[in-house]
Each structure stands twice: as C-alpha cells, then as structure tokens.
C-alpha cells in the first residue's frame, strides 16, 4: 500500500511537471508576448520596440530557463541598465536588489502579477477559489445524494418500471449540458416575462417579480436560496445523470451476485437485502466516479459562473484567458491541474481502501 | 395582418384535449406512485383451469392504463397538429406550430420513408435492423435522424438566410409579421421570432444543425481512428510503447477540457501555427491506419495493393498535404517545371509568384479557426477512445481465435486489424454514438464561449451565448437552439442505449 501510494505520487508529480510545462509553453508563445507588450506598454509600438520591451522584462530568454524561474528552481533574472539601476524578476517595485530573494516562483509561493486585476495573483485567487468552493460544495451536496438514490432505486430491480423511468431521467440529464439547462432554468424560474414567475407573481405567491434570481452576483456576499438555487441546480443536473447511471450499473451487477440470491432464498426482506447486503458493495464503483467528477465539474463551473455572473475561479479563468493575463492564467491552470491530480489520487487510494479484494492482496 | 398564434385554427379544439391529456397523465403518475408507496403491485397473471392466462385489473393497472391512453392522446394531438399544419392553406390557420411543421415537410417525408423501409427489411439489416425491435433505440434513432435530415434539407426548411436582417424585428416575439415580405415574395413571418440582431431565430436554428452535424461526426470519426491506431498496438504489443502512450493519454485526460480549449482555441495559437503541427500529427494517423489495414490483409495479392491500396493512400496523402499544409505537389511540380522551361519571360515570373500563393487543387479548404476547433475536439476525445480500445484489446487478445491466428503465422498487424478489431466493434459502435453527443456538447461549449467560431455563425452554441444576455426579458432567441442541442444529444444517448441492449442480446 505504501509503495503504491509513493508510485502514484511520483507519477502525479511527473504529470504535474509536464502539464505545467505545456501550459507555460502555450501561454508564452510569441504572439501572446507581443500582445502583452502592446497592452502593457503602448498599442502603437514598432516591432523593434516590442522586442526591446520584452528583452527588458526577461521574456526573450530560452523557454526552459523562464519556466525554471517561474517554477522557482532557477534564480530569477537580474539586469543592470545604463543608469546602473538593477531590475529583476524577484525585485518588486520599492525593493532594493540586495534584499530581494534569489528564487521567486510557484514553489516559493509567488504566483506573479495579474495585469487585469492589477494586483498580485495570490491576493486575488484565494477569494475567487473560496467563492467557487462554496458553489462546488453545495452542488456536490445536492448532486451526490440524489444521484446515489436514483441509481440505487433504479438498479435494485433492473428492468422494472421504476428503473425505466429513472434511467430515462438520468439519460436526459446527461444530455443537458450546463449552458442548455442554465438557459432553460432561467427562462422557467427567473424570467419576468416567461415561465412560472409571472403566473406566481400574479397570484401573489412570491414576493419579488421572479421565483429565483437569474444572476448569482449577490451570492458573492450572501448566499441565499433565492440567488443560489439556479447555479447549483445547473451544475448538479449534468453531473447527476452520469453518477446515477454508474451507480445503477454497479447496483444491478451486485444484485445478480450469488450472496444476494442466497440472502433472498434465506428469506431476508428485500429492503434489508438492499440496505444491508447490496448497498455497501454497490457504492465502491460510484466512489471513483464521484471523485473523478470533480475535474468534470470544473468545466461546468466555468460555464455556470459565466452564465450567472458569479466571480469565482471559472470566471477568473475566462477573464484571464480572454485578456491575455498570462500569469493569472498560469496560476489558474496550476490550480486546475492540482485539483485534477489530487482527485485522481484520492480516487485511486480510496478505491483500493474500500475494496477489500484489492486491499488484502 | 395579425401576428400568428401558436396553434392556429386547430388550437381551440386541440389545446383543451392536450391540456386534459397532460393532466390525466400527471394524475395517473401521482396515483400510481402513491399506490406503489402504499404497497399495491401490478396484477399477477392468473392461470385458468383451461390453461389460458388472464389478468384481473387492479387499481395500479388502471392507473397505468390511464397513463398509457394519455400518452396516446398527446401523440395523436401532435400528429394532428403536424398534419393540420401541412394540409391547411393559410398561415393564420396553421399557426406557428403548423407553420413550422409545414416547413419541415421534407424531413417528415424522409423520416417516414426511412422507418417504413427499415422496418420492412429489418431482418436483413444486421445490428441496424435489430434497432427497430427496441423502443428506446427507435426513439433515439428518430431524434437523431430528425436532425440529420434537418441538416440535409436545411435550405428548403429555413425561411430566411442565417444572416438576413429585418431591422424592425429586433427581439420580435414568435409569429411576428415581416413588414413588406409579401410584396417581394419572401416568407411573411418570423416563425420563432427575431433575435437581438433582428435575424430569424427559426432559420438560424435550422442552419445551425448543418454546422453542428458536419463537424461533430467527422471530429468523432477522426478521434476514433487516432484512438484505434494507437490503442491496438498499445494493447496488443504492450511494453514501453504502451507505457509511453498511456502516460501521454493520461496527461491529456488530466487537463481540464475547458482550460485546454482556452489555451488552444485562441487567435494567437492559430497565428503561431500550433493547429497545423497538431493537425499534421493527428491527421496522418488515419492514413497510416488505412494503409496498414489494407496492406496487412492483401499483401499476398499484389494487384489489389497496386490498384486499390496505393491509389487510395496516395489520394488521401494528397488531401492531407493540401488540407494541412496547403501544399499540392502536382501544382508545385507543374509550376516549377513550366517556370523552368520559360525562364526569364513574364509567364515564368507569374508562375513563380503564384506558386507561393496558390490554392491546392486537392484538399479541403479549412481556415485556421475551424481547423483548431476540429483539432482540439479530436485531441480531447482521442485519449478516451484510446483507453477504451486498449482495454478491449487486452481482453480480446486472450481469446482462442487470436491464438489460432498466431499459430497460423499471421503478422501482428493482421491480427490486430482483422481479428481483434472486428470483434471489438459492438462496444466501439455504442461508444461512437455516445461520443458524437459528447462532441456536440463540446462544440456547443466552444460556441458558448465564442472560441474559434465566427460570432455571426448560426452555430447553436454561439446562438445560445448571444441570446443569454437578454435572457430574462426576451427568452425566445436562445431557447430553440438550446432545445435542439438537447434533443440531438438525447437522441444519440438513447440510440447508444438501444444499440447496447440489442448487441448484448447476441
């Protein structure tokens, strides 16, 4: 078990290294840097001026060296110009060259400077991640239990009417990506001209003009049912179907096992068979799926946050990517990659831990 | 003239029926659910003394029957609406639903023909024919074919061009009258209203089907060829190659899709030439696949290799060069040769100058933006396909017929492509259907973020994105493309389900 975890962590670090290198390469392509120079310096710079600007800021050196600096394993560059002032990667404004650290990269906790927010990335990203954390937490709290219930109910009697109905529901939900379900939810619940809201308001059953709010901007300060239901439902719906289908398949397989038949023949009540014998074994496979669902949710979070104007991690990623905010985008990628790899690790370890057949051998 | 109503002249008769049917269905569902909770079950068959079987209907069965009749009623009303839309003469009588149904005439005909022919000959059509024994599969197939035929007949169905503007109909509600349309013989209504750019929502949705259904299946097909070409040797031969490719596949899978899109599908990337590099790798794999496929089978028959395999491969290579590198060796040699013969004269000058900027004769003209969309969708999908294929190969290579082929002295590629691959086709076909749906969702995501697509394009994703800004006030523009995308993906999922069930029955 210990060796297994060590190997997994080794592979994970290698993967993280490769992925960040790829992201670094893709965000530091020549056209991106040129655009950066033009937005930060002057939009009408000539090519020579652009090159000069980039050279002054250390962007013209080899990619691998810059990657090392960004990672924090290569000493940051310093440069002495004609007037003898020293500038460098690690020398922040108002700091002398002597007191600046030699290394300043991700490993030292320095994520760089965001050109869009005009602030250090580490200052901005924390708050945004917390907002997304809430969104994901509540979505998970809604999605996982309902998916498991649907899956178990459908899988316990394979082919029954209940199974057919619930399977249709979960298939429909996997066919509804967030940008479709979000739009439909807003129209049904949050539009003042269509859907349920005008009718409810006319009868005086709701206080405001709409049942729920179509924008989650106010949820950044204060999460209420009114402003947070729709984003949560949107995220939960797409992931729910997939987990439910996995649970159903797993449950259906367990229900055909020998020990379930033995229990039935012994005269155990169906309810007890499901709850005491089948459920524990049927939930091992969905556990992996649920953990691997988190990276999938990332896409959903980006879509939902854009759709509902919720300034969390996904929104930040979109803003960084569309405004060529290179260091912010890099940091977002690091966060995303870490989330993905950690969930994979947890799912692997959890699977081994939960499954006695693998654990003991 | 008045704006159209939703249901036209049939509305006053049919709408109450529809409402009652839906109400009855809901009632039946609630009753049924309540009775199941209480513990009532469906009636068991009773074996009579004369060996016949009969049922005594219990309350649960009554509720079920009620629901069934309600569904039939709803279906009947829908059919009457469609027929009414086609048969009634005036647009006012047709209403919006009827008008749309009438525009969809070619699709209805094609669907009916497909179903009649398929059901008639279903015993001779293999797995495709078996699909028609399965209700879920049939519904899924119907939904998919509905959109396929919509894409095929799009110019006949659409009432306006996707970019035509009628300035006064900005955000107009469904059924609005187009001013001055009857004078110039154009369609007199915006059937599903106008969007924020005063374009016809209905026509854009119909034309969008074309955009979606040309890219998604092809991208999926390429992803499959890439995944199969890499997955077969990885699973069959194993070793270092397997370790390397599996690591690379896991690397791509560890990338959050949306991040990959945001990094890959940008103008800067297109400018830096990354799509061409990626396309040069991804698109050569299917050609290698085809060549190995033909060569491993027919290498003992030189005439087939000479007259079939080589020409096909060379032709595909020409398409590959023309599409990815914009390079056509034929044109290149011709211009070089003529330029060489006429050195120093104006013709030669012209030849050498056009050589730099010629369009290849063979090759599909894809612009950088579309290419990067295509490439990144293939790139995202192929690792998953690779993993599926590898898993299947690992399973199948232990079978007896593989051992028999090995004993016969067949080469590894023959075994992989002609022994293992055909036996893995069932799960692959099912996954292909699912994956087209997933690709459609991915393309919609790209459109939703405005990545790599022309903002004017009627692509469903970008239409939804455009409509969401004024969503709470004008809900009608993004709704049709959203429902279209959903039904298409649902159809593909149901089709895959049906196929899986039928292929498991063998």
Image: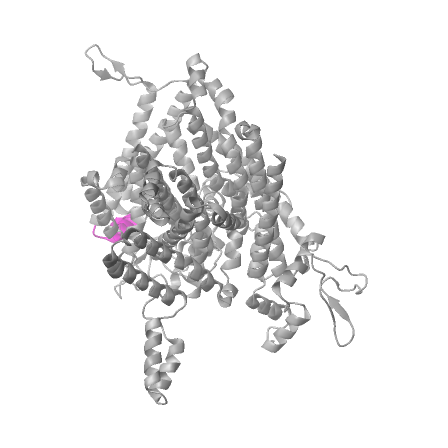
On the image, the x and y values in percent for residue A2 come to: 63, 36
Viewer-closest of A150 and B407: B407
In the orientation shown, which residue stands out farthest toward the top? B49
Query: Number of labelled discs?
Result: 0
Viewer-closest of A190 and B409: B409
Q: Is residue B86 visible?
A: yes
Q: Quadrant of the N terminus of chain B?
A: bottom left
Residue at (26%, 35%) from the top-left corner? B133
Q: Is residue A217 visible?
A: no
Residue at (24%, 55%) from the top-left corner? B301
Whether residue A225 appears in magenta in the rendering, the answer is no
- Magenta stretch? B88-103
On the image, the x and y values in percent for residue A125 come to: 65, 52
On the image, the x and y values in percent for residue B449 come to: 49, 56
User: Is B290 left or right of A285, judged from the image as shown?
Assistant: left
User: Is B127 left or right of B395, judged from the image as shown?
Assistant: left
A15 shown above or below A96: above
A361 shown above or below A342: above
On the image, the x and y values in percent for residue B267 come to: 50, 65
The quadrant holding residue B182 is bottom left
Viewer-closest of B1 and B502: B502
In the orientation shown, which residue stands out farthest toward the bottom? B344
- Colour setting: one colour
* Magenta stretch prevailing secondary structure: helix
Q: Quadrant of the C terminus of chain B?
A: top left
Whether residue B98 appears in magenta in the rendering, the answer is yes
The quadrant holding residue B13 is top left
Residue at (63%, 54%) from the top-left corner? A331
């Amino acid at each position: 078990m210990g060796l297994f975890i060590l190997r997994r962590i080794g592979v994970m670090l290698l993967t993280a290294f490769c992925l960040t290198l790829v992201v670094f390469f893709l965000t530091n392509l020549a056209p991106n840097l040129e655009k950066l120079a033009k937005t930060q310096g002057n939009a009408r710079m000539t090519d020579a001026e652009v090159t000069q600007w980039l050279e002054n800021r250390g962007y013209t050196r080899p990619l691998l060296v810059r990657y090392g600096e960004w990672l924090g394993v290569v000493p940051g560059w310093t440069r002495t110009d004609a007037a003898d002032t020293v500038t460098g990667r690690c020398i922040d404004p108002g700091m002398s060259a002597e007191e600046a650290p030699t290394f300043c990269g991700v490993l030292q906790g320095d994520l760089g400077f965001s050109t869009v927010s005009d602030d250090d990335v580490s200052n901005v990203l924390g708050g945004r991640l917390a907002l997304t954390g809430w969104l994901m937490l509540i979505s998970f709290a809604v999605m996982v239990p309902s998916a498991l219930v649907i899956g178990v109910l459908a899988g316990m009697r394979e082919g029954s009417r209940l199974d057919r109905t619930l399977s249709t529901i979960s298939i429909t939900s996997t066919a509804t990506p967030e940008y479709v379900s979000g739009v439909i939810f807003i129209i049904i619940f949050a539009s003042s001209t269509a859907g349920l809201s005008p009718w409810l308001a006319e009868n005086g059953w709701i206080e405001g003009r709409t049942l729920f709010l179509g924008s989650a901007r106010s949820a950044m300060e204060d999460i209420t049912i009114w402003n947070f239901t729709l984003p949560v439902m949107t995220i939960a719906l797409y992931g729910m179907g997939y987990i439910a289908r996995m649970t159903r398949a797993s449950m259906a397989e367990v229900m055909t096992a020998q020990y379930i038949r033995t229990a039935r023949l012994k005269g155990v009540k169906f309810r007890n068979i499901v709850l005491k014998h089948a459920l524990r074994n049927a939930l091992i496979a969905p556990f992996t799926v649920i953990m691997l669902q988190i990276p999938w949710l990332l896409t959903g979070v980006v879509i939902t946050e854009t759709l509902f104007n919720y300034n969390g991690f996904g929104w930040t990623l979109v803003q960084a990517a569309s405004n060529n905010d290179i260091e912010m985008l890099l940091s977002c990628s690091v966060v995303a990659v870490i989330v993905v790899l950690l969930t994979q690790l947890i799912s692997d370890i959890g699977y081994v831990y939960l499954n006695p057949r693998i654990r003991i051998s | 003239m008045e704006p159209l109503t939703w249901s036209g002249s049939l509305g006053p008769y049919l709408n109450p029926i529809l409402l009652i049917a839906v109400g009855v269905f809901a009632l039946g569902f609630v009753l049924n659910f309540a009775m199941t909770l209480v513990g009532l079950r469906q009636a068991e068959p009773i074996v009579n003394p004369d060996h016949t079987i009969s049922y005594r209907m219990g309350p649960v069965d009554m509720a079920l029957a009620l629901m069934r009749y309600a569904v039939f009623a709803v279906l009947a009303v829908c059919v009457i609406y469609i027929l009414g839309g086609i048969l009634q003469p005036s647009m006012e009588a047709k209403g919006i639903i009827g008008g749309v149904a009438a525009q969809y005439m070619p699709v209805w005909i094609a669907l009916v023909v497909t179903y009649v022919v398929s059901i008639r000959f279903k015993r001779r059509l293999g797995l495709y024919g078996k699909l028609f024994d399965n209700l879920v599969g049939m519904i899924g197939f119907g939904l998919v074919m509905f959109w396929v035929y919509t894409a095929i007949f799009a110019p006949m169905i659409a009432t306006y061009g996707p970019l035509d503007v009628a300035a006064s109909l900005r955000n107009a509600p469904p059924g609005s009258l187009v001013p001055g349309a009857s004078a110039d013989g154009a369609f007199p209504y915006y059937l599903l209203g106008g969007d924020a750019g005063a374009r016809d929502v209905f026509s854009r949705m119909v034309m969008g089907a074309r955009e979606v259904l040309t890219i998604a299946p092809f991208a999926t097909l390429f992803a499959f060829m890439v995944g199969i070409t890499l997955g077969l040797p990885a699973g069959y031969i194993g070793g270092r190659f397997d370790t390397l490719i599996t690591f690379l596949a896991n690397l791509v899978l560890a990338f959050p899709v949306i991040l990959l899109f945001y990094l890959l599908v940008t103008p800067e990337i297109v400018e830096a030439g990354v799509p061409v590099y990626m396309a040069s790798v991804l698109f050569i794999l299917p050609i290698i696949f085809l060549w190995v496929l033909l060569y491993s089978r027919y290498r003992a028959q030189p005439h087939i290799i000479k007259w079939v395999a080589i020409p096909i491969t060379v032709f595909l290579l020409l398409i590959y060069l023309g599409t990815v590198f914009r390079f056509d060796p034929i044109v290149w040699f011709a211009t070089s040769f003529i330029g060489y013969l006429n050195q120093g004269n104006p013709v030669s000058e012209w030849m050498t100058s056009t050589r730099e900027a010629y369009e290849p004769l063979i090759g599909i003209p894809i612009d950088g933006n579309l290419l990067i969309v295509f490439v990144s969708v293939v790139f995202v999908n192929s690792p998953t396909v690779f993993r599926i294929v590898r898993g299947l190969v690992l399973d199948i290579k232990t079978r007896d017929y593989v051992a028999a082929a090995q004993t016969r002295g067949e080469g590894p590629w023959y075994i992989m492509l002609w022994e293992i691959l055909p036996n893995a086709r069932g799960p692959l076909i099912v996954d292909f259907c699912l994956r087209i749906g997933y690709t459609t969702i991915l393309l919609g995501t790209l459109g939703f973020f405005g990545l790599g697509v022309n903002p004017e394009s009627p692509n469903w994703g970008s239409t939804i994105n455009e409509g969401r800004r004024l969503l709470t006030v004008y809900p009608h523009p993004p709704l049709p493309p959203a429902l279209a995308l959903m039904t298409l993906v649902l159809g593909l999922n149901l089709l895959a389900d049906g196929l899986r069930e039928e292929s498991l029955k063998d």
